[in-house]
Amino acid sequence: MSTRLETMELLGSATESARTDVWRYLVPVGRLLLAAPFILAGPFHFAPATIRFAAAQGVPLASVLVPLSGLLASAGGLSILLGYRARLGAAMVVAFLVPVTLVMHPFWAAPDPMMAQLQQAMFMKNLSMLGGALLVSYFGAGPLSFDSRRERSSR
């Protein structure tokens, strides 16, 4: 009976080890998926059309704040992607998302039901990215990152 229990414990630890190895590679994929929208959208924040649209939505000093928000989003996204000071990068993404979500996607104020539905979807999408950024800001970049490498070398 004890050999069966020992075998089950051995299989359990092997399964746990394999699961840990898989998660080790999934974390950087998650960082990539979280960071990609911020990295790809950042340059568009310098486009005159984007600045005009933000101004029409009521963003004050749009010609200054929109490009700055593009820098904030791009830098935060790159930080998360590379896992280099990822907690700071995630805080940058949070600082980007909160005002953008509230100002640019006010679904509660849209008079047209279709526009309200579209804005609500964009609002919820931003909330989900905000949740991901908050998780990175708490847990860090995880394995296979510059942050974990720096932590290992400082021990």
Image: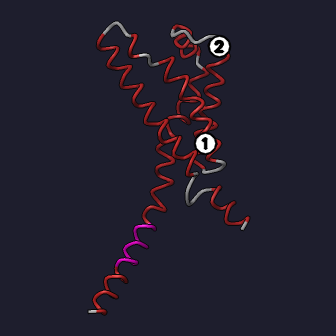
State how far apart marks 1 and 2 are (Cα): 23 Å
Q: What's the mark number on residue 122?
A: none
Q: Do the numbered discs 1 and 2 sit on residues whose CB atoms are within 8 Å?
A: no
Ranked by sequence position, the earlier of labels 1 and 2 is 2
Q: Amino acid at mark 1?
A: Leu
- SS type, badge 1: helix
Name which residue lies at 64% across and 37% down: 75
The quarter of the rendered structure image containing the N terminus is: bottom left
Q: Check residue 138 for magenta coloring.
A: no
Magenta span: predominant SS is helix
Rendering coords of residue 55 (x, y %): 56, 9
Out of 82 and 5, give the one closest to the viewer: 5
Q: Check residue 18 for magenta coloring.
A: yes
Name which residue lies at 50% across and 46% down: 32
Q: What's the mark number on residue 78?
A: 1
- SS type, badge 2: helix
Q: What's the mark number on residue 63?
A: 2
Tell me if mark 1 has few (under 14), some (14-19) or many (20+) residues whose alpha carbon lies within 10 angstroms of its own: many
Q: Amino acid at mark 2?
A: Ser
Start-end of magenta stretch: 12-21
The quarter of the rendered structure image containing the C terminus is: bottom right
- Residue at the extreme front of the image, as rendered: 1
Name which residue lies at 60% across and 42% down: 78
**In the rendered image of this protein, does residue 74 appear above or below residue 144?**
above
Out of 96 and 48, give the one closest to the viewer: 96
